[in-house]
Image: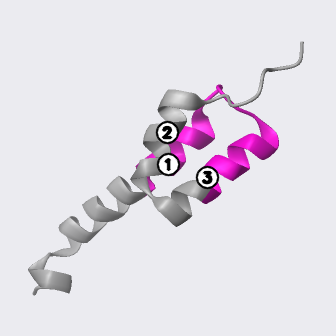
Amino acid sequence: MGTLLGLGLFGLLLAAIIWWLPVILILRSDKTHGGEKLVWVLLIFFFSWFSWILYALLAPVSAREV
């Protein structure tokens, strides 16, 4: 039994995990906190993987307070 584009259930689960991977990585990261982390996650939803690459290169955007 095939589903979307001939993919089986395993294929759809794998695609979902790959799509959610950047969000999970950002939420577990210690690079950012609070509102900045929320902004990065929202960027992932609107611009997908490109935002995660920017997160890996640029985060944290602001200096942390000691």
Q: In this view, does 56 lie to the left or right of 16?
A: right
Point out the image quarter for the N terminus.
bottom left
Circle 2 residues within 10 Å: few <14, some 14–19, many ≥20: few
The mark closer to the camera, 3 or 2, is 2
Q: Are marks 3 and 2 in contact (CB under 8 Å)?
A: no
29 falls in the magenta region: yes
Q: Quadrant of residue 53?
A: top left
Residue 19 image point, x, y percent:
38, 59
Q: In which quarter of the image is residue 32?
A: top right
Q: Is residue 13 left or right of residue 23?
A: left
Give the residue displayed 19% in from the left and 67% down from the top. 11
Residue beneath label 2, please? 54
**SS of the residue at dot 1?**
helix
Residue 18 image point, x, y percent:
33, 54
Circle 1 residues within 10 Å: few <14, some 14–19, many ≥20: some
Point out the image quarter for the C terminus.
top right
Q: Is residue 56 above or below residue 50?
A: above
Q: How far apart are marks 3 and 2 (CA)?
A: 12 Å
Residue beneath label 3, please? 41
**SS of the residue at dot 3?**
helix
55 falls in the magenta region: no
Highlighted magenta segment, given as a residue range? 20-42
Residue beneath label 1, please? 51
Q: Earlier in the sequence, mark 3 or mark 2?
A: 3
Q: Which residue of the protein is positioned furthest toward the right in this rendering? A: 66
What amino acid is labelled 3 in the image? Val
What amino acid is labelled 1 in the image? Ser
Give the residue displayed 88% in from the left and 18% down from the top. 65
